[in-house]
Image (cartoon, rainbow, N blue to C red):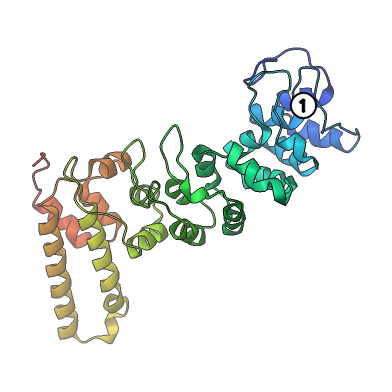
Amino acid sequence: MPSGPPQIGPEPDILTGAIRSHCNQCYHLLRDQINFPVLRFNDFGWSFLGLALTVGCHEIARDIAHHINDPGHVTGSANVKQVGSPRIITLALQTGDKTIFEPIYNQIPAQLARETLSQHVTPHERAQLCRNSTPDLADRLLQDGCNIADGVDSNTHDTSWHYGIENPCGIPFMQFLRRNQTGQVSKNRANANGETPLMKAVRSKRLDMVRWLTDISVDVKHEAFRGTTARTWLQSFKAMRKAQGPYSMPWTLGYGERRKIRRQYRNRVYKKYREISGHEPDRTLTYAAGLTAAQYASRFGLRELATYINREPYNLRPR
């Protein structure tokens, strides 16, 4: 049987057929009527769990992982007849799915956990785990010598911080990354496309992450080799937040006070625009999202800034 997703052909048993066909309904229907030997291997040498992970049938893999209690099996080869076959635990890690990896991790004896993780968890797998791991799971792994804050995807060069932007646990997980960041994988490291975690948060419309990353002072300075206005955009974003207070209840202020606040805000916007005009726009940010400078200003609620940019366009050529 090939190492990649198996081709259509005769099946040695009904469980292999359900997995190769990605028939989740078949598997669940038969599971309650047939005593599947989930700890055994089929005639091609595949572990049923290893086969499910290899062909990407994660729902079945998740169920099998919860029905296995054998540390030697889950840390063994996915295919015992293939030389160099990946380990089951490695395949589980690469899914980035804690509901598959955690039950496997729970089966490893405490005295063997540190050694097992050091052998099978590379920076690539550590990065994948940041997709949906909880802070509690991350802390457990850290205690066993596996710091998932130190992860880098071997293909895209996305770091743990990039994947943390997508993590459903949100800010609490990002706080774990901040507490345990290393010099090699910092909050400012860019991926293969030159996109920093902050830029990914903006492109993903995760304003909660934008606020949090801004508050912890991520590096948004001008980068001479390609130019960026991330710094000025974030300053404008902060200006908007500061201005939200008085404008949230305009009826509580007199006419003269409202005019004064509007004048101050307009002057602040024009000041930020003058700062922007001194830099080349951030190509990574604008190209990735397909937005102009004025559209970015509008997205952040800076209508005055967007109007001003449209009225007095600045030179977009490299300086």
Q: Quadrant of residue 305?
A: bottom left
Counting from the top left corner in percent of width and height, residue 58 is at: 67, 36
- Residue in the foreground of this view, choosing between 210 and 84: 84
Residue extending furthest toward the top:
9
Q: Is residue 12 above or below residue 125?
A: above
Name the residue located 44 percent from the left edge and 32 percent from the top edge: 155
Counting from the top left corner in percent of width and height, residue 62 is at: 71, 40
Q: Is residue 84 above or below residue 184?
A: above
* Three-letter code, disc 1: Ala
- In the picture provided, is 247 more to the left or to the right than 212? left
Q: Can residue 115 be spotted in the picture?
A: yes
- In the picture provided, is 8 more to the left or to the right than 143? right
User: Which residue was labeled with disc 1?
Assistant: 18
Counting from the top left corner in percent of width and height, residue 122 is at: 53, 38
Query: Which image quarter is the C terminus in?
Result: top left
Counting from the top left corner in percent of width and height, residue 96 is at: 57, 42
Name the residue located 58 percent from the left edge and 36 percent from the top edge: 94
